[in-house]
Image (spheres, helix red, strand yellow):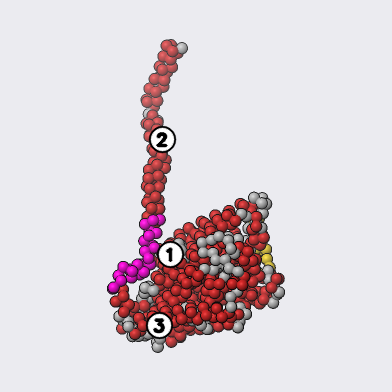
Amino acid sequence: MKFDLVWLIPIFPLAGVLINGLLGRRIEQKNKSLVHWIACGAVGLSFVVTLGLFFKLLGLPADKRLYDFAWFPWISSGVFHVGVGYQIDPLSMFMCMFVTGVGFLIHVYSIGYMWHDEGSYSRYFTYLNLFMFSMITLVLADNFLLMFLGWEGVGLCSYLLISYWFSDLANAVAGKKAFVTNRVGDFFFAVGILLLLVHLGAHGIWSLNFSVVFAHANLLSPHLVTIICLLFFLGCTAKSAQIPLYIWLPDAMAGPTPVSALIHAATMVTAGVYFIARCNVLYSMSPFAMEVVATVGALSALLAASIAVTQNDIKKVLAYSTVSQLGYMFLGLGVGAFAAGLFHVLTHAFFKALLFMGAGCVIHGMGGEQDMRNMGGLRKRMPVTFYTMMIATLAVIGFPGFAGFFSKDGILWETFSGAHGSYILWLIAVLTAAMTAFYMFRLIFMTFFNECRASEEVQKHIHEAPKTMTVPLMVLAALSIFGGYIGVPESLGGSNLVERFLRPVFGLGKDKLLQSAGGPGLIHRAVSETAAHQSFSTEIQLMFLTAMMVLAGIFAAYMLYMKKRSVPETLAANNPSFYRLLLNKWYVDELYEKVFINPLRSISFFLWKGIDVVVIDGMVNSTAAFFMKCGSAWKASQSGYVQRYAVSFLVGVFVLIAYYMYVR
């Protein structure tokens, strides 16, 4: 397969958008199933093309795995030119493989989940295909501007999909919250791109192509690079739900469950991780920016895990788990473990998509119930869902042998031993791992074990999901087990194929990081080259310690939610303030409401009622009223009566005569 066929990857979903978007209602009326055949087929074809290009790339020598496909010119203004082009390299193909692959499984899963929905079937799949087109554009783009187009596209589609059931106020509000929050981050992101263009332009480099920008990054001052990287990171905190702009992601659970799987697993929330990895050359030039990324990632992971401990909505628990796992990814990027961070993106796509889709099967089987306090005993009635979700849970907590274990260990090891690592951040990450094990097994025990707490009417209708929903679960379950073995570290006898595959993309950035070791920083810990490559025995000891922490979290969940089920209520009653603090998500939403939203709403109200209505509208209306009165006065003189015109004529004659007699 030729690399020139890369344009087919985004064009197939776009074709699905046009067909279902323009003709979907007619198709739906004649043959409803044809809608999902078009939508799923489009993404399936994109996956097939991606697979072909991936293996073609894999067959090339490591130093030859780069191909730029310039499709057509887009913007030309003087010396500035931007085209629509796609970049094929290990990073873009790595991302595109699971974006299209997991995206295809979610499309198939949506058939069973949305078949009986009263909304527009074609509209739903049109939005899904548009989302895939935008995400593929983001991943494959060879320049900042085209990538930003895909970046904005996934933001728009997230709004459309989250508020798909727009007649429900909660869904509409959640979609709006996601849209507005992402626009805040996108503002800083756009400013970063403009700064990059202007300052490179001052040196005669009027291009936003990644290859050109990174090749001339040395022309930028260190302080400017830091500012640009921090602006980019603010944009990433919105798209990838990190402190301080993570607040939209839990509310996004209001949308259909397949949408939650699509947004939270392999696509939108990983866009920020991908972008920082793509810009590894810039970030490697700024140790301070790297430290900020690592610190925010670690704190986001811990904060989200603490909130997930008390949530009762099964999708909300998974939402905060997503924020926490994304924190691990940013921690990896921040300490320079770019490949480890991307490896966790891959494994997370498998097990988190599986968890959300499994939760969707539970909700589907229980007639829409999402509160875990009304569940229980489902493992016998929904065995496929139970076993696949158990596999995903073991993967997400990093249980030895499962996919998440290998990717998470890579991040923890680099955080502990890397030149830009930090013992404090490592401790936070290990503590978060224990908390993850606790709240995830809390979800398993409350949902699938003990007696069923649902009403008798609901219990009568509990059933396993159809095969269109369970088959994707089985595929993802297999990937959640075996998907991590492509990145087995050398300490366990592996060769870490993921790091070797991505090394050509991150090589220059890693070199710059090693050169910067020893510089000033908040959490920077310079180490010698010998210390940076500690013995395998130390890494295995740390794996064992982390595994013990994970087992401790599982044991705590078992004791509280299986053996002594009255203890959680007792603990909550004895510590009401702390419990409410966690249950209400540290009151971050309320804080933002008071500090930002209410003042902005007051200012907007003043500008509306005070400036717009009183001043601007007042001036316009007063001007109009003045001329209307003048017109009315003049209108009175134009009565149409000849007698009045004759009198006016005589008066005018007398005035002229008087003027010439007495004035002249």
Q: Residue at x 64, y 68 (%)?
A: 507
Within 10 Å of the Cα at label 1, are there few (<14), some (14-19), or many (20+) other Cα atoms? many
From mark 2 to mark 1, how far is it between C-alphas? 52 Å
Within 10 Å of the Cα at label 3, are there few (<14), some (14-19), or many (20+) other Cα atoms? some
Amino acid at the residue labelled 3? Phe
Q: Are marks 1 and 3 in contact (CB under 8 Å)?
A: no
Give the number of the mark in front: 2 or 1. 1
Within 10 Å of the Cα at label 2, are there few (<14), some (14-19), or many (20+) other Cα atoms? few
Q: Which residue is mark 3?
A: 555
Q: Which residue is mark 2?
A: 627
Q: Residue at x 51, y 78 (%)?
A: 542
Front one among 341 and 292 = 292
Q: Which residue is mark 1?
A: 247
Q: Tag 3, which secondary structure?
A: helix
Residue 108 visible: no
From mark 2 to mark 3, how far is it between C-alphas? 82 Å
Q: Eyeballing the image, is 201 above or below 53?
A: above
Helix, strand or loop for the magenta stretch, by majority: helix
From mark 1 to mark 3, how far is it between C-alphas? 30 Å
- Extent of the magenta region: 573-596
Q: Residue at x 48, y 78 (%)?
A: 546
Residue 368 visible: yes
